[in-house]
Image (cartoon, helix red, strand yellow):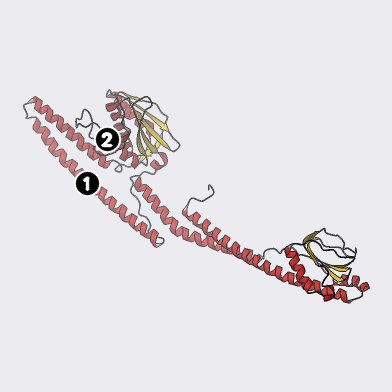
Amino acid sequence: MRAWPRTLGMQLVVVTSVAVFLSNAAVALWFELGSEQLNESALTDRLIDRTASVATLMSSIPPKAREAATRALAGKVWRFEIRTGKQLAQPMTAEEAKLAARLKAMLPAKVANLPVTVQFRQRIPSGETTHNGLSRLPGGEAIVMTVPVVRNAQLVATFFKPPMPPWPTEVLLAAFVAFVVAAAASAYIARRVARPLSALAAAASVAARGGAAPPVPELGPDDVRNAAIAFNAMTDQVRRTLESQRQLLSAVGHDLRTPITAMRINLEFVEDRELREGLQKNLDELQDLTESVLSASRGAGGETSRQVDLAALVESVCADLDDLGEPVAWESHQPAPLRCRPNEIRRAVRNLVENAVAYGKRADVAIKDAADAYEIVVEDEGPGIPEVDRGRVFEPFVRLESSRNEETGGSGLGLTLVKAIAEGHGGGVVLEDRPKGGLRARLRLPRAAADKCT
């Protein structure tokens, strides 16, 4: 199956062309076989008639004139000779016996009781002479018929079958023309179908990576054109919905910051220190939650992509956290060029590292090279996450730690944001157990997919 084309257009061309070729070959073979059967039947009739006529002639002329008559009647494919002596019956196949019976029925009554022998496909070497040595034979497949002329004298008639004629040039030319026409027609149809589908697939791929999908040309057959129209309407609706969502969240964020700031100012007038500190902590949590919601809403799409060194970017995140006294270890890596949205990648890496420090005591960070992607690997020494819960932790506001205390868990949006950023770059994030205990997070960023981010 490796030779089978993978694109719809080429598959359509190959299937149509092969179907036309096989159908033409089948029709030509059918007519050829039918013509061959008709020719065989006509040839058999001629053989019987010619042999019976010559045998009748030989029985009516003097014996001394028979040798001369056989030479005169011989031709390019016919040879005749007279043999004397008692004729012995020879074994024959059913088909040969049937032909011998027909030939015997056409002979004179005076020799009706004498045996007639027919032998098919006798291979006679080229240049071999006849029984009387008077003529040379062309060689090849032959039909040998031994017919009694008078008692103790037989006519041996040898018919050399001409070689099968080659297929007519007209048939081969017609098959070739049909093949070319079918290939051209299928290529035209394939182009009308495959090009809009390719454009649709490319636009869908851009949309899946979080980019702005270009309008798909509404061309081709009705089915393909209707799919393009529906896709354009869908992407337009999604774009308007996302834009409205961003505007709404931006307005909510702006409106929330104003009362939070006012509440911070009012806290200065609270004389009870313990109460003031508690309210201050609640306001900080509310502020952090607001910023997390806004970051998650912007997760994949607000920033313009550019070429960066992924290794330097991750190293800078680790260095910043190390300066804050966090137990973060970075494994040095050679430059890793990648086109991406760097601030989003920085946010995703920071969230993974901070989660590792918060729940797993420390974070070991490295970049692993794959054939078509980079993997940012963050490992910790914590208790890990049960396998049944690894899918849920990426859902918004899901926290395996049931309290809402900021000291024991965040807002539940950190991993949601990491997943949105990874998928926005055409990649993904996976959580798995470490062999020595702890959790390992793999943030995969495909190089080719990320290069197309817009």
Q: Position of residue 6 (x, y in %)?
A: 48, 50
Q: Position of residue 213 (x, y in %)?
A: 34, 50
Q: Residue at x 32, y 24 (%)?
A: 381
Q: Residue at x 23, y 32 (%)?
A: 410
Q: Is residue 228 above or below residue 304?
A: below
Q: Residue at x 51, y 51 (%)?
A: 5
In the rendering, which numbered label is found on residue 414?
A: 2
Q: Residue at x 33, y 33 (%)?
A: 387
User: Is the C-beta separation of discs 1 and 2 under 8 Å?
Assistant: no
Whichever of labels 1 and 2 marks the residue nearer the N terminus, that label is: 1
Q: Is residue 303 above or below residue 61?
A: above
Q: Position of residue 199 (x, y in %)?
A: 40, 53
10 Å crowding of disc 1: few (<14), some (14-19), many (20+): few
* In front: label 1 or label 2: 2
Disc 1: which residue: 247
Residue 306: quarter of image: top left
The answer to whether any part of residue 173 appears in the image is no
SS type, badge 1: helix
Asked whether, in this view, residue 156 is left or right of residue 437, the answer is right
Residue furthest out toward the right: 64
